[in-house]
Amino acid sequence: MQDIEPYDNWQYLYTSETDVRSPFYGREYDFQFSNTIYNYYIHPFWDDFGSGTLYLKVLMADYEEQYVIIELIGEWNDAIENDVMRLKRDVIDEFIHQGIRKFILITENVLNFHSSDDCYYEEWYEDVEEKNGWIVSLNMPSQTQYDFIKARLNNYVEMLSLPAWRTMKPDVLFNQVDNILLRRLD
C-alpha cells in the first residue's frame, strides 16, 4: 500500500496544503512512512482526518464552480470508526461552509465498507441537495459498492464509473459528472 500515492497530476492547479480555505491548509509532508491501514504503511502524502482505516487527499477545490474532488484510500468503516461522521464534521462541513455543494469522491482504493446508520449521509445529502448539489462516488470497487448499496447509501451518494478520470483535467471531470447527473434527472 505504500506504493499507492494520491493522484498528483493536478498539483500545478491546486494543493490543499496551500489553500487557506482547506481543512488541510498548512500541512507539511515528509517522506517518513508513519500512517498505517491495519499493519500496512501508506504513502505519507495521504491526509489523516481522524480515522484509523481511511485516509484522503483533496485533489481539487474550485470555489467558483462550487465543487471538490477527494480521493480516498483504505477501509471505510462506519460501524467501528464512524468514518462518515469524522469525514462530514472535519472535512465536508468545512468545504460546505466555504460554498462547496458538489462532491466527487474517488473511491477506487476503498477496499472494504462497513455500514452503520445513514444519519450522516442523509445530513450531508440534505446540506447540498437544497443548494442543487450532489455527492458522487467514482469507481468504487464492486465488492465495496455491494456493501454500500446494501446499506441503501446510494439513496444519498450517486455511484458512477469513469475509469479514465486521470486523463481529464479537473474541470472536465467535474463537467462530465455534472452532465451525467443532469441527464439522470431528465
Image (cartoon, grey):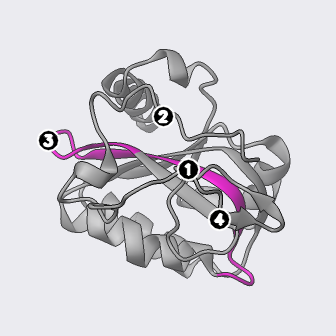
In space, the residues marked 1 and 2 are separated at their CA atoms by 43 Å
What are the residue bounds of the magenta stretch? 59-81
Q: Which residue is mark 3?
A: 64
Identify the amino acid type marked 2.
Arg
Toward the left, the furthest residue is 64
**Foreground: disc 1 or disc 4:** 1
Q: Position of residue 119 (x, y in %)?
A: 54, 81
Q: Which residue occupies 52% across, 49% down?
A: 45
First in residue order: circle 4 vs circle 2: 4
Please tell me in which quadrant of the rendered image residue 96 appears: bottom left
Label 4 and label 2: CA atoms lie apart by 39 Å
> Which circle's residue, 3 or 2, is located before the other in the chain?
3
**Crowd band around label 1 with a 10 angstrom C-alpha radius: few (<14), some (14–19), many (20+):** few
Asked whether the beta carbons under mark 1 and mark 4 sit within 8 Å of each other, the answer is no
Main SS of residues in magenta: strand
Q: Quadrant of the C terminus?
A: top left
Residue 27: name its quadrant: bottom left
Report if residue 26 is visible in the image: yes
Q: Nearer the viewer, residue 135 or 132?
A: 135
Are the residues flagged by discs 3 and 4 in contact, CB closer than 8 Å? no
The residue that label 1 is drawn on is 31
**From the viewer's perspective, is the residue at label 1 or at label 2 nearer?**
1
Which amino acid type is marked by label 4? Asn
| Mark 1 residue type | Phe
Which residue is under mark 2?
184
Q: Which residue is mark 4?
A: 35
